[in-house]
Amino acid sequence: MQGKIIRGVAGFYYVNVEGEGVFECKAKGIFRYRKVKPLPGDNVGLTVISREAMTGNIDEIYGRDSELVRPAVANADQAVIVFAAAWPAPNLNLLDRFLVLMQEQGIKTLVFRSWSVSTKKTRSGKLSRRSLRGSTRGADARCFFSPQNMRRAPSC
């Protein structure tokens, strides 16, 4: 049976098998011997131990298209990077590192700059800095970077 690892926690891997559901699996010891670690995103072959308990063992890891170290994922197609525009001060060196890593792996990348600073004053008269969690109002899609064109877009 084949599936895709969707989560890995403390040696347990949750494998989504199309049409069957999510199985809780352990990796065989051969992977430790080969020094290969199953990663979320890996396409794997598994043996079902119990269909009622939805448990199994991962027997084989199929080829990877890409592999990222941090976060540890495999077979990523695209990445979205969100950076602050003003506060906290953006670390452009870190952004460069992300872009180079994505280019090296051949992953399409989209970078957003986030405007998440509130201009409201608190009772003490200081400016309040709060994030807009779960809101798309803070994202500005005009500033687009791609691995092929690593210069700032004219609208930035």
Image (cartoon, rainbow, N blue to C red):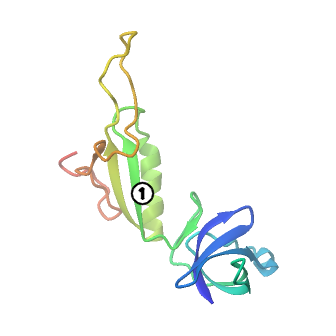
Q: Which three-letter amino acid code belongs to the residue tagged 1?
A: Leu
**Between residues 71 and 156, which one lies in front from this camera angle?**
71
Q: Position of residue 94 (x, y in %)?
A: 47, 47
Q: Secondary structure at mark 1?
A: helix
| Left or right for 53, reference 40 | right
**Between residues 90 and 47, which one lies in front from this camera angle?**
47
Q: Looking at this view, name the residue that lies furthest to the front.
A: 52
**Between residues 62 and 137, which one lies in front from this camera angle?**
137
Quadrant of residue 43 within the rendered picture: bottom right
Q: Looking at this view, name the residue that lies furthest to the left.
A: 155
Q: Is residue 38 above or below residue 114?
A: below
Quadrant of residue 91 within the rendered picture: top left
Q: Position of residue 50 (x, y in %)?
A: 74, 83
Query: In which quadrant of the rendered image does the N terminus lie?
Result: bottom right
**Number of callouts:** 1
**Residue behind mark 1:** 99
Q: Position of residue 9 (x, y in %)?
A: 69, 62
